[in-house]
Image (spheres, rainbow, N blue to C red):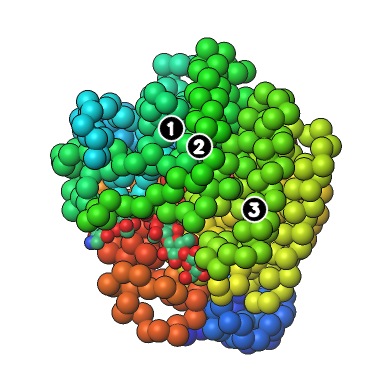
Amino acid sequence: MKSIFVNQVGFLPRSQKKAVLNFQCDEFHVLDEKENVVFTGKTESFGQDDISGESTYAADFSGLTEEGIYRIEAEGVKSFSFEIADNVFDKLKHDVCKCFYYLRCGHGLDKKYAGKYFHGPCHLTKATVYGENVEPVDVSGGWHDAGDYGRYSTAGAVAVAHLLYAVRLYRNFINVQLDIPEEKCDKGTLPAILSETKVELDFLMKMQRDDGSVWHKVTTFNHASFIMPEDDKDELFLFNVSSLATADIAAVFALAYLVYKEYDIAYADLLLQKSLKAYQWLEEKPEPLLFKNAEGSNTGEYPEPEDYSNRFWASCALYEATGEKKYYEAAVGLKSKLLDYDLTATDKGYQGNVFTCFGWADVAGLGSLSLLLKNENSDLENYVRKCFSDEADRLLENAKLNGFNLCMKKEDFIWGSNMELLKYMMVLAVADYLNPNDNYKNVITSGLDYILGCNTVNISYVTGSGENAFKNPHLRPTAIDDIAEPWPGLVSGGPNVGLQDEVAMSIPKGTAPMKCYLDRVECYSLNEITIYWNSALAFVIASFYNK
Ligand code: G3I
Ligand code: 9MR
Ligand code: ZN
């Protein structure tokens, strides 16, 4: 079928603007709302690539800078509409951040703030410490992880970190308005985004044991069936502590200390104290304590093969927070371990430079951000600066290999491929922060174009953003709440060649990576949502507000 793929939200007036066609044409036109031709251009043929499986033709209309709502037309084929405006991403920014509120666990969602998506209190019972004969523990609160109702420490720490590093690097991001309860009652105390991250930080504090270690997760023994959160009454379990969770919590609390101390010194001090306690536990237990699901339990595992990147992040974050040399030295030691691992491991969960990784497992990139923010010209800081510029160069090269100017390769189309892309866009944003460069900006723009509809399934991967946005996330409440559309701002996991659920398996093997996607509620391996996919997009959008 002849199609024109375009970002269905739109473009900033001065940014690169392009659509991608899968057919040849003499000329393409940009039409305004009254169907007047406001721009005419010729396409550039790329040929076929191995991620889209299509012959592609790029239609560049960067020269159109006037604000308005438009479509692309060529040979009678029309694209979905898009906007050019200075505030084109304002709604997206709001929606993507508001999702954390909708995912809150505990006291329920109020109609006043959640509208028709309100629900009753959930998961307030105390959790049984799995395999131990001790008193059950109150770990209420925080955010549901995803389409399931689990709450996982490493995933939560990383999502909070994306948001807090965004606040630190891109100061304007702090002004995002969210219409959440705290924005009304704490006005003047905390900016809304920090009220929202505090919800998760408060929960993560409860996940820490008295000895400083941190439980890996709290979930029911098996995933709930498709029921509302308030109806999920199964026993909650706190599963084993891990050095992964303990290190991530040490890191994110140290980071949060630096952010919250401007607003609430008592809360910031508490965060630092708990961070130090977690770190002390890690010092006393230098061997990795990894995580495996308890026999028979099927909730998210978030397994990692080593804990070096987690310990590296913790050391860098505490170094930034305290200035104590011992943390810097620990980070230098962990740098060597990470390099050895990078050279020898066969089960690496990342492509590219390990010191620029921002995922739920590989978190050394977050440590690198703490070093960059320390900004004292140390050897390690200069080393990670170079890592960002090397990795950004690799990504610019990737973008030349397909017709979408997309910095992904076929290996990146795994479960949560949209996050693989968003992590790369974060790297490019950091590289651009360090050394502003239009090439970085253009590849970030192409990445956002892809997320918002410039892809071969012609779908925007953010609910409520774009004429043809996905509508059927694997998300328990929206699957059963009788409301036609999910709330806006959710990021889909996206195409995955692994086809790891039953309905995904209906996609023929060998289908082009970009097309391995279905907007089906059953497809947890293609169409789930999670907090750390939303937070990664929030970081990227924040980078656009760097004024
Ligand atoms: O590390 C390997 C890499 O070496 C290999 O080349 C590549 C291709 O096969 O796979 C990589 O592993 C992938 C791994 O993520 C690390 O990225 C696995 O295939 C992939 O199955 C795994 O997916 C994770 C999924 O859980 C299953 O474990 C997703 O990243 C992760 O986001 C997702 O998380 C779930 C939680 O468990 C439960 N809550 C919902 C959440 C989102 O779906
Ligand atoms: O709904 C679950 C989703 O959140 C997880 O990412 C996924 C992998 O852990 O598992 C989903 O639950 C499925 C379960 O694993 C197998 N039975 C079907 C469940 C979804 O309907
Ligand atoms: Zn809940």
Q: Report the front residue among 389 and 495.
A: 389
On residue 285, which mark appears?
2
- Image quadrant, ligand 1: bottom left
* Ligand 1 is within 8 Å of the C-beta of the residue at disc 1: no
Contact (CB < 8 A) between labels 2 and 1? yes
Q: Earlier in the sequence, mark 3 or mark 2?
A: 2
**Mark 1 burial class by Cα count in 10 Å: few <14, some 14-19, many 20+:** many
* Ligand 1 is within 8 Å of the C-beta of the residue at disc 3: no
Q: Is residue 518 above or below residue 115?
A: below
Q: Which residue is mark 1?
A: 213
**Mark 3 burial class by Cα count in 10 Å: few <14, some 14-19, many 20+:** some
Secondary structure, mark 3, is helix
Q: Nearer the viewer, mark 3 or mark 2?
A: 2
**Mark 2 burial class by Cα count in 10 Å: few <14, some 14-19, many 20+:** few
Quadrant of the frame with the C terminus: top right
With 216 as the anchor, is 482 left or right in this view?
Answer: left
* Residue in view at x 29 percent, y 62 percent: 521
Q: Which residue is mark 3?
A: 338
Secondary structure, mark 1, is loop
| Residue type, mark 1 in image | Ser
| Residue type, mark 3 in image | Leu
Q: Earlier in the sequence, mark 2 or mark 1?
A: 1
* Residue in view at x 45 percent, y 74 percent: 497
Q: Earlier in the sequence, mark 3 or mark 1?
A: 1
Q: Gap between marks 3 and 2, in whole Å? A: 18 Å
Q: Gap between marks 3 and 1, in whole Å? A: 23 Å
Does residue 389 appear anywhere in the picture?
Answer: yes
Q: Position of residue 407 (x, y in %)?
A: 65, 66
Q: Position of residue 154 (x, y in %)?
A: 45, 43
Q: Gap between marks 2 and 1, in whole Å? A: 10 Å
